Amino acid sequence: MVDYIFVSVFILLQVVLIIQLYFITIVHGRLRNYKITGPAAQTVLPVSVIICARNEEKNLEKNLSLILEQDYPDFEVVVVNDCSSDDSEMLLRGFSSRYPHLKVVTLTEHARFKHGKKFAVTIGVKAAKNEHLLFTDADCRPASPNWIRRMQAPYSPGISIVLGYSPYTYRGGFLNAFIRYESFSTALNYLSFALSGNPYMGVGRNLSYTKSLFFKAKGFASHMHILSGDDDLFVNENATAANTRIEIHPDSHVWSEPKTSWSSLWRQKVRHMGAGKAYKAKDKRILSLQTGTAVLFYILLGAMAALQAQWWIVPSVYLIRLIIQIIVYYPAMKKLNCKNVIWWFPLLDLFFNTFICILASVALFRKKVQWK
């Protein structure tokens, strides 16, 4: 009986390993082998940068000028001041007096109608005068004055979505390493799948799409009842292999400030995970298979050890996956500005997959989220 269980577990472990190596080498290998382009094209598309901000006075004071002073000849910045109770309105008035290409839209909270970020984004899109839209957040800062130019470079006839990347700032410590690794893993996945012809999400901290696509898709109408997902659900619903491109040149990155406590990170991730339930069925199946086999890989390794497998089997299987991961992921980490997390990698991979598994379980039963 013990031998039968051992053989069954070992066969299952091999199947899981093969599935994992498919995602690592075939899918994620797309980003590893992706060639970053040289100088950005000089074609100028009029752009509207949209920022939705609620009580973001300090972040706007620190970051807004970096966006308003981009090296791009034809753009406006639309800031939706979404029911802020701080001094954002006064700060934005000062910016408006200095920057004529800044447009401020102020929303006030209705006593009985409470809205989420999707409503603010919709108002921003309607206020934008240009066809090409570029989204970021108030707590984000462009990596260079060429951010807008870089994020518009992939556009050509038929392209209506450009997926960008937003790394988190290095602060030291395990929490920060985990946040940066989680951001890398998320980006590695959605960028690789986009390169494989199956774009399924993007991040609103650095995302571009056309105004005509937004209205053709009726905005967020199909998922307005879900408070989160103004970025990934819109991309999941509207992105195709034909209309989507990625942009990861270092000049196109938008840096974000990481959370500083586990509780704030948990709340943020529960909010984000809630949108995943509305993904297309095929995307949910693929992502569930990917994450499920990653978690099962570690469980089966533990089971093999408990069944007293020969001493070399467990470390050998573990090292096969780990070495291939490092070969594929380290070049991708360099592209995505987080190569120093490689030193935490063995611990982070185990912790990340456990974290995602627990998070997904909690998100299934959590009903109410809020964006601020």
Image (cartoon, grey):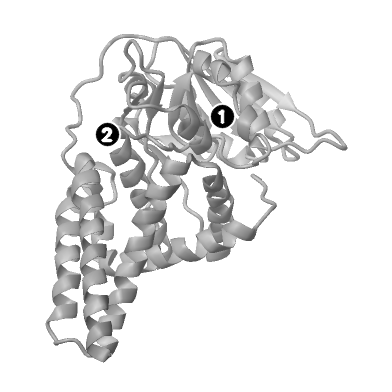
Residue 196 percent across, percent down from the top left: 26, 36
- Residue displayed at 17% across by 72% down: 317
Q: Return the residue at label 2.
A: 195
Q: Is residue 172 visible?
A: no
Q: Residues within 10 Å of mark 2 (few under 14, many from 20)?
A: many
Residue 33 percent across, percent down from the top left: 16, 39
Along the line of sight, which residue is nearer the eye, 132 or 73? 132
> Which part of the image, by quadrant, shows the N terminus?
bottom left
Which circle marks residue 328 in the picture?
Answer: none
Residue 61 percent across, percent down from the top left: 57, 35
Question: Image quarter for residue 176?
Answer: bottom left
Q: Is residue 257 left or right of residue 341?
A: right
Q: Return the residue at label 1.
A: 51
- Residue displayed at 87% across by 37% down: 112
- Asked if disc 1 and disc 2 are in contact, CB closer than 8 Å, the reply is no
Along the line of sight, which residue is nearer the eye, 127 or 223? 223
Q: Residues within 10 Å of mark 1 (few under 14, many from 20)?
A: many
- Residue displayed at 52% across by 41% down: 139
For marks 1 and 2, give the CA distance: 27 Å
Secondary structure at badge 1 equals: strand
- Residue displayed at 84% across by 33% down: 110
User: Nearer the N terminus, badge 1 or badge 2?
Assistant: 1
Question: Image quarter for residue 198?
Answer: top left
As shown in the figure, which amino acid type bears the numbered disc 1? Ile
